[in-house]
Image (cartoon, grey):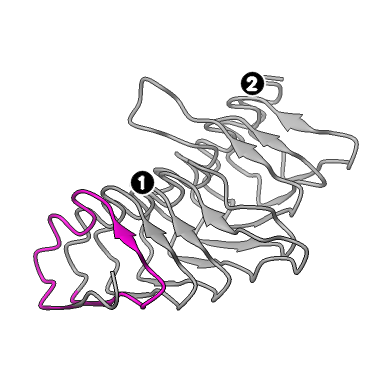
């Protein structure tokens, strides 16, 4: 539940069993010495789950995750906002990258996004999934079919993005405010680019719109 282990400052490790399907808001907030967290087979993630966990530097997102919630009153803060996570791996087999998954996880520098499972037709990256993170590059796998609204917005450290020839839609403000993005190539598979998709990209000097 919400804040279940909040403030357990000497907790160093946690293993969530596969029986757990949801983790509440702030569940492990303030666990300053928590350096290892296994999310098991969880399906729903609350917001600020690891807020203040300054020792937690990496996380693996299980393929079972279906939804990630955010704090309505605090600029789309998602499950890992307020944590110190720098690297993340998403397991292959996840149906879609949930909206708000890493929203406002400002310390996140690298993330591994897998190819989709062969049984899936569509593979979408949800709205605000990587909003306001410290990613320096976004290498999207070839199986991604849609990039949501504000997915990479305000990623001011982002310098390069690879959009492969399977993406159909790029949402509103998808890369808005990516001030250090210098070049983008839109593949022929893209049929629509949303409003303000690359707005505020001050250093963007080359844009190939493909077959949009």
53 up-or-down from 57: above or below: above
User: Is residue 160 within the magenta segment?
Assistant: no
Q: Residue at x 37, y 68 (%)?
A: 190
Q: Residue at x 66, y 45 (%)?
A: 34
127 up-or-down from 29: above or below: below
Instruction: Name the residue tied to disc 1.
Output: 149
Q: Residue at x 33, y 47 (%)?
A: 150
User: Is residue 205 within the magenta segment?
Assistant: yes
136 up-or-down from 176: above or below: below
Q: Is residue 191 left or right of residue 54?
A: left
Q: Main secondary structure of the magenta part?
A: loop
Q: Identify the element where label 1 is drawn.
A: loop
Q: CA distance from mark 1 to mark 2?
A: 30 Å
Instruction: Name the residue tied to disc 2.
Output: 3
Q: Which residues are magenta?
A: 182-207
Q: How far across and down, in percent of the image, does residue 83 sit?
A: 50, 44
Q: Identify the element where label 2 is drawn.
A: loop
């Amino acid at each position: 539940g919400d804040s279940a282990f909040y403030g357990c400052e000497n907790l160093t490790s946690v293993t969530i069993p596969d029986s757990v399907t949801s983790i509440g808001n702030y569940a492990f907030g303030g666990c300053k010495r928590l350096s290892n967290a296994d999310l098991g087979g969880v399906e729903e993630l609350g917001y600020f789950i690891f807020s203040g966990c300054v020792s937690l530097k990496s996380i693996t997102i299980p393929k079972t995750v279906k939804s990630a919630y955010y704090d309505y009153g605090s600029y789309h803060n998602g499950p890992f906002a307020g944590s110190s996570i720098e690297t993340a791996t998403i397991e292959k087999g996840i149906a879609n990258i949930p909206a708000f998954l890493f929203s406002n996880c400002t310390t996140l520098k690298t993330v591994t996004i897998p190819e989709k499972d062969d049984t899936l037709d569509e593979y979408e990256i949800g709205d605000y999934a990587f909003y306001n993170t410290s990613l320096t590059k976004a290498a999207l796998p070839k199986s991604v079919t849609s990039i949501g609204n504000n997915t990479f917005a305000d990623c001011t450290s982002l310098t390069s993005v690879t959009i492969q020839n399977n993406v159909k839609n790029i949402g509103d403000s998808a890369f808005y405010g990516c001030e250090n993005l210098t070049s983008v190539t839109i593949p022929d598979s893209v049929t629509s680019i949303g409003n303000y998709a690359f707005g505020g990209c001050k250093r963007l000097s080359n844009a190939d719109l493909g077959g949009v």
